[in-house]
Amino acid sequence: MTPTPERTYSSTLDEEVQTAVFPSGLTAIFCPKRGFRKKYACYSTFYGSVDSEFVEPGGGSPLAVPDGIAHFLEHSLFETEEGNVSDLFSKLGAYNNAATSFTTTTYLFASSERFYECLALLLRFVENPVFKPEKVEKEKGIIEQEIKGYDDNPQWVSYMGLLEGLFQRHPLRIDIAGTAESIRRIDSETLHRSYRAFYSPPNMILFVVGDLAPAELFDFVASRSHFAAAPPPPSGDRRVERIYPEEPRAVARRESRKPMEVALPKLLVGFKEIGVPPRGDELVLHDLASELALELIFGRSSDTFRELYEAQLILDDFGASYGSGAGVGYGVVGGDTPRPDELRDAILERISRLLERGIAEGDFEREKRKFLGSHIRGFNSLEYIASHYTYFRFHGFDLFRAVDLLAQLDKAALEARLRALLDPESCSCFVVEPRRRG
């Protein structure tokens, strides 16, 4: 049976979504884009690399699984009885991909033709895993080669090196793919247990965007998804319980360096936060204010960027970003530089200067309008709509309300966010250095 969808409309964005929650708990969301030839769908589970210890639905003792298992599951689902999923999508003329992050796993495709055939394939392979022991063993070799490839990537090495320097215990410090040692401990039984725990209807969202008839779409999902057709969870049945270690306030290391085959050094400066709000308005305002604050200080239109560029301390790749998940957060700033120690000192000095003087009203208003404009322009992208709406929904928030939430942000609140985030006591640095010859 197809539930009656609930329509949500944003007059600010002139966008709407229709949401159907099936009795099983599966959420299907549709965003109509009339006149768009391309159609896009993503099927996501609120399950990422940080979820390496949990209590299974129904209770029991905590289960600790090998690092990298969420990413391993993503790879394994692509091998079906029909063949490799990417080959099957290619025959339908569609692009497909998948991604595992620290907190989510998403399977997606984009197509102009044969959309419902592609959607049937997406539902089929995500909901019907095949974990044959021989294929699991084969996958270990493939992922081990992928890990080795990341070990040679200076951008990834510096990023994960910084997270290891920031966090002492939190699984955010562990590579999403795990290690060669951890994935060797993965077996079919552990994959099945992890899949059953996190690939359950109440923990998943199907998001579709494009020029489609809503009733036809929701009826199709109702008839083709056995997750949608599953019965409601038993009364009192618990969802999976995630377990994260208590993270100390202090960083793990103040600074780390690693020699690699690079022409120029790469510097990342990070700032650690604990006690980040878990969901809802509080989390979203926290994340958006953090991103806006970092853009205001270090963005390409900032005085800091201009001064550092003119001093030849940075290149065009210099930038800043904010990330959060599972109760912690981190700000990151940096890029390639000929003089990493000078750049580190310059970044910290400019932060100190700004925190002392405060934000100029004109700078605040300009960056806030620019930030809002960038968010609104994102709704021209089907991928942006699907990924951001899904992320916010997992965290108990409606993406359409982000514009109104940002509009309420004033200079005093942003300055408070800056001071909380850019605490020098929570700072760590990571430097990739050119390998010395001879």
Image (cartoon, rainbow, N blue to C red):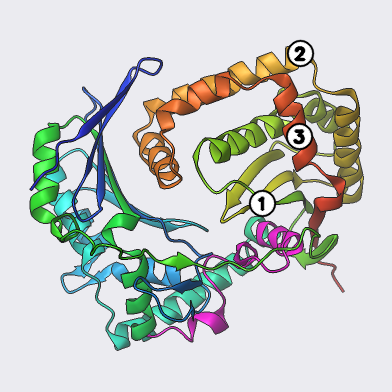
Residue 411 location in percent, x, y? 72, 20
The residue wearing badge 2 is 361
Tell me the mark number nearer the camera, choosing from 1 and 3. Answer: 1
Chain part drawn in magenta: 159-187
Work out which residue is located at the far front of the displayed protein and give it: 236
Q: CA distance from mark 2 to mark 1?
A: 29 Å
The residue wearing badge 1 is 275
> Which of the two labelled residues, at mark 2 and mark 1, occupies the earlier sequence position?
1
Residue 38 location in percent, x, y? 24, 34
Residue 114 location in percent, x, y? 12, 44
**193 shown above or below 365:** below
The residue nearer to you, when weighing 344 against 266, is 344
The residue nearer to you, when weighing 154 against 205, is 205
The residue wearing badge 3 is 418
Q: What's under tag 3, amino acid-wise?
A: Leu
Inspect this view and state whether residue 15 appears.
Answer: yes
Please tell me in which quadrant of the rendered image residue 398 appears.
top left
- The quarter of the image holding the C terminus is bottom right
Q: Is residue 38 left or right of residue 434?
A: left
Tell me the mark number nearer the camera, choosing from 2 and 1. Answer: 1
| 7 within the magenta span | no
